[in-house]
């Protein structure tokens, strides 16, 4: 699913991540690591938000650096602590993302209902609580038909019912062929998800911990 070749990311000449050669297969992957280990940096690179050196390929055909448009159509990103312009409504963002990603008809409504976001979408995001912002970010991340969905710290600020709904959506999309990378700085078990592998970001690289 993801292939890294000679990958490195630095800030002001200081290396943050280096992955000489690695293949992450299709599936649901849990990426652990302490705060500041580089998990979010990795996700922002994969989402096309940060430059890097080396090559990253998706499904063996999409070179992320050389095919930026196809890259952004193929990978979706739900941020750990999402921020949006305070004046825009959640519904306006949903409509924008749905159009850009050519989301199937009715998909946005299904996601909003499942994640309990319908009631507050008409409001400006400046009035949202952290939980509302997180729910909106999940709706946006699941829109369209990406090959890979990145969810950074997906459990924070969510109530139990929404977490279960998110698990259900992940399983639903996984059955349809979508892969997932999820992060956490905490050692959290996820018995409700059929994890393919668990990884650890440590010592400025990504290493396999367990595989199923």
Image (cartoon, helix red, strand yellow):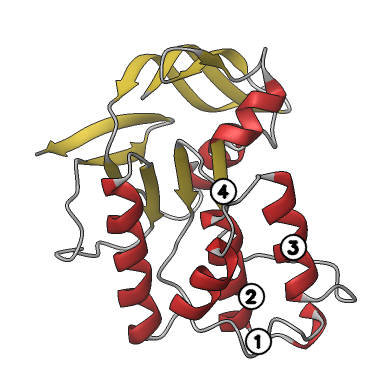
Residue at x 31%, y 66% (from the top left corner): 167
- The N terminus lies in which quarter of the figure? top left
Q: Is residue 207 left or right of residue 62?
A: left
Quarter of the view holding residue 24: top left
Q: Marks 3 and 1, how far apart in space?
A: 21 Å
Find disc 2 in the rendering and name its residue. 133
Q: Of all residues shown, which one is farthest toward the front? A: 105
Q: Position of residue 106 (x, y in %)?
A: 56, 65
Is mark 2 in CB contact (under 8 Å) with mark 1?
yes
Find disc 1 in the rendering and name its residue. 129
**Circle 1: is it few (<14), some (14-19), or many (20+) Cα within 10 Å?**
few
Q: Is tag 3's residue or tag 2's residue first in the polypeptide sequence?
A: 3
Is mark 4 in CB contact (under 8 Å) with mark 3?
no
Q: Position of residue 57 (x, y in %)?
A: 48, 16
Q: Secondary structure at mark 3?
A: helix
Q: Nearer the viewer, mark 2 or mark 4?
A: 4
Find disc 3 in the rendering and name its residue. 95
Find disc 4 in the rendering and name its residue. 144
Is mark 3 in CB contact (under 8 Å) with mark 2?
no
Question: What count of labels does the image hold?
Answer: 4
Q: Position of residue 204 (x, y in %)?
A: 44, 30
Is mark 2 in CB contact (under 8 Å) with mark 4?
no
Q: Is tag 4's residue or tag 3's residue first in the polypeptide sequence?
A: 3
Q: Is tag 4's residue or tag 1's residue first in the polypeptide sequence?
A: 1
Q: Marks 3 and 2, how far apart in space?
A: 16 Å
Q: Is tag 2's residue or tag 4's residue first in the polypeptide sequence?
A: 2
Q: Nearer the viewer, mark 3 or mark 1?
A: 3
């Amino acid at each position: 699913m993801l292939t890294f070749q000679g990958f490195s990311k630095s800030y002001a000449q200081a290396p943050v991540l280096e992955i000489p050669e690695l293949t992450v297969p299709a599936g649901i992957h849990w990426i652990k690591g302490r705060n500041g280990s580089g998990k979010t940096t990795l996700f922002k690179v994969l989402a096309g938000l940060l430059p890097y050196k080396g090559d990253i390929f998706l499904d063996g055909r999409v070179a992320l650096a050389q095919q930026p448009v196809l890259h952004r159509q193929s990978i979706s990103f739900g941020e750990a602590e999402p921020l949006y312009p305070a004046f825009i409504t959640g519904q306006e963002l949903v409509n924008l993302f749905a159009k850009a990603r050519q989301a199937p008809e009715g998909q946005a409504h299904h996601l909003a209902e499942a994640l309990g976001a319908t009631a507050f979408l008409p409001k400006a995001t400046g009035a949202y609580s952290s939980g509302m912002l997180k729910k909106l970010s999940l709706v946006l991340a699941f829109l369209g038909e990406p090959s890979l969905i990145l969810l950074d710290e997906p459990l924070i600020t969510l109530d139990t019912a929404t977490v279960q709904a998110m698990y259900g959506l992940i399983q639903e999309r996984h059955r349809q062929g979508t892969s997932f990378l999820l992060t956490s700085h905490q050692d959290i078990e996820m018995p409700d998800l059929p994890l393919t592998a668990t990884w650890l970001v440590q010592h400025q690289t990504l290493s396999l911990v367990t595989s199923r």
